[in-house]
Structures are given as structure tokens and as C-alpha cells.
Image (tube, grey):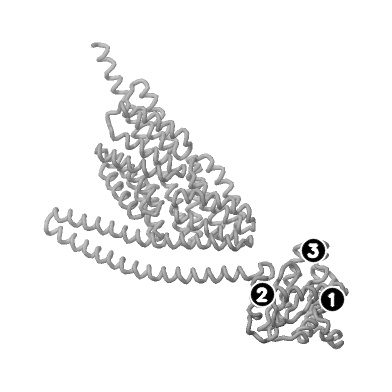
Amino acid sequence: MLLAAVCAPVQAAGEKSALALIEHGTAAMRANPDESKQDAERALDTIRSHPDADLEIRARLLLCDYYSERDADAARQQIDAANALLPQARRQGLRAGVLTCQGETLESAGDSAHAKTDFDEAVNVATAANEEQMLAEALFSRGFLRALQGEYAAGMIDARRSQELFERINMPQHALTVLSTIATIYNRMGDYEQAARIYERVQSQQHAAGLRRDEAVSQNNLGRARLKLGEWDAARASFSDCLALSQELKYPRGEAYALLGLATLDNATGDPNGALGTLLRAADLQRLTPDARLNAQIQLVRGAALRKLQHGAEALLALEQSEAVFKQANSLEELGATYDELALVHAQMGEWQSAYKYRSEAQAASEKMLHNQLDQRFAALKVEFDTATKEKENALLLGQSAADQKALAQERRANTLQTIVILLSLMLLSLLTMLVLYQRRGARHMRALAMTDELTGAPNRRAVLAHLAARLEPGDAQVCSILIIDIDFFKSINDLHGHPVGDVTLQHFTTKLRNAIAEPAMFGRLGGEEFVVVLPDTDLHDAQLFAERIRILVPSIDLSRWLGGRRITVSIGVTASTAADTVTTMLRRADAALYTAKHAGRNCVRTDLADAVEVPTAWRETSTVAL
């Protein structure tokens, strides 16, 4: 009995010490995560001497919270240890805390579906056990995930309930973190100004309270809202503050997100090389945290920078990685941005079919997100309205006089909300109209890209041959002629001066040809150094004269900057249509005439008919003239 009397106070003191460490560590998690980790480990050391399943579970939940952002395996070890202790726990609601931490670990790994299941179960367990702190934490985590998946109204409901619970159990720092998540929901609904105002208020209070880790997160979120508003300098300042705080705290996840924000700014302001350098640092830090969504965002911004630098193959690899993660997470905003970049990369590489496919998917994702934002915003407004109504009813219990004043204020607020709903309806109509116009403009642009030669800007083979086919429609009695023009010895330009000079030569030749040809005539690039000219309502004689004028005009092109004293010349094959002609037969005859011109020594015009009109000598001797 004497031994028990001596040991009992020692054991009680040990339990109190462990409890104090856990409570201090819970507060420290929002200021200095490393300090919180040390408190949890010291609490576990104390508990080993005086075992207590409840305190040990809480200490391990602190460690799980710490490792969920840094080391997935270490986080799972804490979860397994906590699960093993649950049968011995007195507080059955602690199981909700274990489920919440398990869900956060799954969410970081990109497994949103199973994370949502864990959060739902955590809410049910905490509700049944009447554990308000565990319920508030589970609602906070579930609300954030719902917002990521586009369920803004449901996320807002969870966040509001969580904030109310934290305030009721006197945990104002946690309530402040929930308010930051409410700002994130506004940000994802497209209300960037409202989000920025809340982030600024939260960040100011966190700074005053010394919550440096949470302040770093709020600075990053504020930077993202300012980025959406196009406030580049303000966004850069927020991301830089987040980076400095995270480096001071040795918080790699915060550093990585800050660098991601700065790289996004570099892309937006025309510095893709700077973005790639910043992303290398972000990627190194990302490897220290099991955040699959962060890696996907880094790959998205990296793909955009590589696309701007014309590195199509590398850009595709990066964007395909981000696409897979955002699909699994059902993140419409990031998925739409990824499809946009994939469309641009495929278009840049000349893969028009793939570009059109991804552009269509981007537009579908954008339209779905737009409708979802508007629908969810209406639902979120209803949540706010219902909250206001509930507050009004509660106010009636405080006395008739005070209740009348508050009821009047709530009525004014309800009227304001109704006005907002009307304005949002008008905005919806405007946005839908803009979306239709944007889709039409995008379709026209893609159609133009599909019919234009990328190097020269001239119509491509598909466009010019479609024009020729229209002129050969049955029933069109008018004769039509075509010219196939080949730049003489073009290969030697590439061999001696390089392909870039060859490209410049083709561009200058196209400009000269464009200036020389007027409607209804049309020209286009067949491929390589070959061009075709379609001359409607033109017989062989006139077409041959026109070709001769082109031949005389070409040597006047000034390429001395690249070719020195060399002048380019062309060989031209000419043919005119007959009643039975098709595009293929006309091209075959014109090509045969071009072949004859090349064998005749080049720099000449030949037709496919034996009785071709002889070109007057005067044409050959006349100096260069503009057509």
C-alpha cells in the first residue's frame, strides 16, 4: 500500500506531463511543425514509463499530421500503431482522428476516392461518439477535399460546421485555418477578389498570433488568388514571403508550392527559361513530400514552359504525367488547363487531329467547370442564406426589441443575397454567350491552322487542291490552268547554308508570289520547294504567259544577306484543264511539264501539250516588273 501511495503521484505527474506536451504540440503544429514533432516524441517517451492508450494515440496522430506532408511510410507507421491501440482506448472518438489522418495521407498520394471514404467514416464515428474536436477536424478535411473535387456547396457546409465547432471548443487557431479553407472554396468558385480579402485577413491574424507555418500556407494561397486576378507584382510578393517563411521553418512542401507559384508567374510574364530553373528546385523539394497533386502541378507548369520554348516532345511527357493525376483526382480546373496545353503542343508539332481532340476536351472541361461553378455558387449562396435565416431565428429568443432590429438586418441581407442571385443569373447568361463565341472562334482558328502551311503562312496542299477540285466540278465549262513551280537547286541552299537559310528562302519566295497573284487566282505550297498556282478561267496560252512573268520576277528576290551573290530561279510546269480532268490528272500533267523544264536546263517554262504557245522573246528580255 505504501508503494502504491508513492507510485500513484509519480504516475499522475507523468500523465500530466504527456498531456501538456501533446496540447502544446497541437498548438505548435500551426506555428512550427518541427517543434510539434519534438513534443509528440517526448510525450511518447513519457508514456512508455506510464502507458496510456488515449494519450499515445493522440501523440501518434500529431506525428501522423507531421509526416503526412513529408514521409508517407512514416505516416502509415503512426496510423498502424494508433489502430493497434484503439481496442484499449477509453475515448472511442479517437478512431475518427485516426481515420482523418489516414484519409489525409491517401489524399496526398492522389487517392481521393479512398480518402473521401475515410473522411465520411470519420465524421460518422465522431458524431456517434459526440467528439466535437475530432468531428471538427474530420469535417475540415472532408470539406477541403470536396472543394478540390468541385463540390463547393458541400465543402462550404463542412467548413462552416468545422469553424463553428472549433470556436465553440475554444480552438481559435484551428478556426482561423478553416476560414482560410473557406477562402479557398471561393477561389475555386471563381470569386478571386472575395478569396483574396479573406486570405489577407487570415494571414494578418496568423502573423499576429505567431502561426508561422499557417501564415506561409496563407501567403501561398493569397499569391494564387492574386495570380488569378492578374496582379503579378502582388502575387510575386506573396509567393516570395511564403518561400522565405517555409525556408526558415524547414518546411519543404511550403517551399515547393511557393516555387511553383513563382514559376507560374515566370511563364505568365514571358520567361519560360526562368520558370524551368525555378521548377527544378521545386521538383527537388517535392521529392521530400508525398504530394502527388503538387508533382502534377509542377509537371503542368513545366509542360507549358517547354511548349513556349518549342520543346514539344518533352512538353508532352510532362503534360501526360499531370493529366493522369488530375484525372484520378477529378480536378476539373487543372485538367482543363492540361488539355489546353496539350492542344497547343500538338498544334505546334503539326499534329492537328490530336490538337483538335485536346482542344475539344479542354472546352468540354471548361464548360463543365463553368456550369459547376455557377450551380455550386447558387448552392453556396443558399447555404449562406440558410445560415442567416438560422441566425435570425436564434436572435428572436434574445428579446422582442433586439430581435426586431436583428430581423430587419437579416431581411436586408436576404434582399442583398436575392439581388446577388439575380446578378449571378445575368452573369451566367453573359458567360454562356462568351463561351459560345469562344468555341466558334476556336473552331475557326483550328480550321485555319489545318489549311495553312506553318512555315510560309501560305495555303497548304489540302487547301489549294480543294480549291482546284471546286473549279473542276462537273458542269463548270470554264477552262482552268495550273502551274507547278519548283525552286532550282534548292537542296544546295540547305547543304551549303543550312536549313534555316532554306526556310528564309522559302518565306521570301512566298511573299513575292503572294504579291504577284490576285484573286480569283490562288497559290499554295505542295511540299518542300514546290508550289502550285491555280488560275481559274485561264487558258493554256495565258497561263504560259503568266508563268513566264513569274519566272522573270523570281531572280529579283533579294537574298544577298544569306546567299551572297547567288540569285534563285525557278522551273515551271503548266497545264490547262479538259472536260474529263480531275485534280490527279492535272497534277500529273503539270508535274510532267515541270520534269521537262528541269531536263531542259531549268529556269524555264514548259507545258504538257505539243502545240503549246511560244512565249514572245520580249517576255524573256524584259526587266523585272511587279505584277
Which amino acid is tagged 1? Asn
Which amino acid is tagged 2? Val
Most distant residue in the front direction: 580
Residue bearing the label numbered 1: 603
Residue bearing the label numbered 3: 494
Q: Secondary structure at mark 3?
A: helix
Q: Are marks 1 and 2 in contact (CB under 8 Å)?
A: no
Q: Is residue 456 left or right of residue 381?
A: right
Res. 508 visible in picture: no
Q: Are marks 3 and 1 in contact (CB under 8 Å)?
A: no
Q: Is residue 134 left or right of residue 258?
A: left
Which amino acid is tagged 3? Asn
Q: Name the N-terminal-most of marks 1 and 2.
A: 2
The residue positioned 84% from the left and 72% from the top of the image is: 598
Residue 463 - label = none
Of residues 4 and 559, the one drawn nearer to the viewer in this rendering: 559
Q: Check disc 1: other Cα within 10 Å, few if <14, some if 14-19, many if 20+.
A: many
CA–CA distance in space, label 1 to label 2? 24 Å
Q: Nearer the viewer, mark 3 or mark 1?
A: 1
Of residues 38 and 477, the one drawn nearer to the viewer in this rendering: 477
Q: Name the N-terminal-most of marks 2 and 3.
A: 2
Q: Position of residue 454 (x, y in %)?
A: 66, 67
CA–CA distance in space, label 3 to label 1? 19 Å
Q: Position of residue 104 (x, y in %)?
A: 41, 41
Up-down relation of residue 543 to residue 313 (above or below)? below
Image quarter in which the N terminus is found = top left
Residue bearing the label numbered 2: 464
Q: Check disc 3: other Cα within 10 Å, few if <14, some if 14-19, many if 20+.
A: some
Q: Name the N-terminal-most of marks 3 and 1.
A: 3
Most distant residue in the left direction: 400
Res. 566 visible in picture: yes
